Image (cartoon, grey):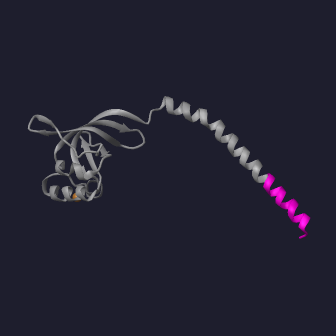
Amino acid sequence: MTRSRFTSLTLLLATFALGVGSVALARAEEGTPAAEKQMATAPAEQPAVVEGEMVDMKCYVAMDMPGGGKHHECAVKCAKMGIPAGVVDKGGEVFTVLAPAGGLADLMGKTVRITGTKAQKSTAIIPEKVEVKEGDKWTEVKLPEGMM
Ligand SMILES: [Cu+2]
């Protein structure tokens, strides 16, 4: 290959790359308004209250283990290790609690009520307020600072 041929090939490649680049750029710009519109009509999150038994997600999912009873000790250990906590509601729906599980370890097996933001992309809740039911009474649980 001669030098001039090499140069023109390089130029050709550069031009091609630039062309592809501008097309990609134009596409990205085209995509922006639609994406914004979609976000405006479909919020990613919505307020929600979830009530049910607190479990550790690993043992619940893998072995159908509750958060209380004979499995209580394991559930507490799992949460302290950082395995996500979850809430199983009356209908059997399971919500992952999107907060550090260590702060929820003492609630394993108890009936809890979590007020927060429900994720749309997953069955999960970001807690703003956590309450525990003892007898017929609901008590707000003080969670470690910075947890939510
Ligand atoms: Cu466990």
Q: Is residue 117 left or right of residue 111?
A: right
Q: Name the residue furthest left.
A: 135
Image quadrant of ligand 1 equals bottom left
Residue 44 appears in which quarter of the rendering? top left
* Outermost residue to the front: 145
Image x and y of residue 40, in percent: 50, 29
For the N terminus, the image quarter is bottom right
Q: Nearer the viewer, residue 110 or 2?
A: 2
Q: Is residue 8 magenta?
A: yes
Figure quadrant of residue 72: bottom left
**Number of numbered labels in the structure image:** 0
x then y, percent, for residue 5 = 90, 64
Magenta: main secondary structure equals helix
Q: Quadrant of residue 112?
A: top left
Question: Which residue is found at the position 22% from the left and 48% from the top?
Answer: 104
Q: Nearer the viewer, residue 9 or 51?
A: 9
Left/right placement of residue 95 relative to residue 20 reads left
Q: Quadrant of the C terminus?
A: top left
In-front residue for pair 121/20: 20
Give x and y (percent) for residue 59.
26, 57
Magenta stretch?
Answer: 1-15
Was residue 27 drawn as part of the magenta stretch in this picture?
A: no
Residue 118, percent from left and from top:
35, 37
Q: Residue at x 30, y 36 (%)?
A: 116
